[in-house]
Amino acid sequence: MEIKNVKQTNVFGKEIKTSLKTIWNHVQVLPNDIMNEMVQKNVNAQGPQIWIYRGADGNPETVFDLLIGFPVENNNVDSSINTLPDFKCASIIHKGDWSTFNETYCLVIGEVMKNGYHMTGECREVYHTVDFENVENNITEIQIGIR
């Protein structure tokens, strides 16, 4: 686990309400839709896709806010661009299949609690490498908001 301060970031994306039970309906589909819209609007991604979870508590039934987006320069005004504020977080790299995210989340949350931090209720996932055919190649940074 590493404690980081992520600088303010502008992301082009879409916000939805979902749950852990239904989130798989959006994997691959929503990021592709966002990328297509970015191409149409001539907006270039400046980094890997980011998923921002607000209000997710680990319960599969809990409905929470999810923003899926790509970092961009804010060189034009577009309602699809959101500014994410500076973000203090506990960060850990998850390698491999996303079906084992729960183990990595439990590990980092345990470390957060053990070290006396308090979670803010916001988590982010930064998808550095996405490989649907060879999931063992996936590299995802999990960030737990702390104070």
Image (cartoon, helix red, strand yellow):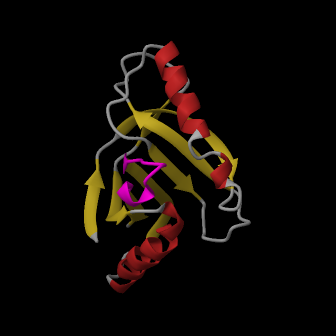
Side of 75 where 54 appears, left or right: right
Residue furthest out toward the right: 61
Magenta part of the chain: 128-140
Percent coordinates x, y for residue 62 in the rendering? 71, 64
Give the residue drawn at x 60%, y 60%: 55
Q: Quadrant of the N terminus?
A: bottom left
Residue 118: tell me if it is visible. no
Percent coordinates x, y for residue 102 in the rendering? 51, 72
Q: Nearer the viewer, residue 98 or 132?
A: 132
Percent coordinates x, y for residue 47 in the rendering? 33, 36
Percent coordinates x, y for residue 99 in the rendering? 53, 66
Q: Is residue 39 above or below residue 45?
A: above
Give the residue drawn at x 53%, y 37%: 31
Indicate yes or no whether the magenta region holds residue 82.
Answer: no
Residue 144: tell me if it is visible. yes
Residue furthest out toward the front: 133
Q: Quadrant of the C terminus?
A: bottom left
Q: Is residue 45 above or below residue 104?
A: above
Residue furthest out toward the bottom: 114
Give the residue drawn at x 56%, y 55%: 54
Side of 73 where 56 appears, left or right: right
Give the residue drawn at x 41%, y 82%: 110
Query: In the rendered picture of this protein, how many numbered marks are placed on residues?
Result: 0
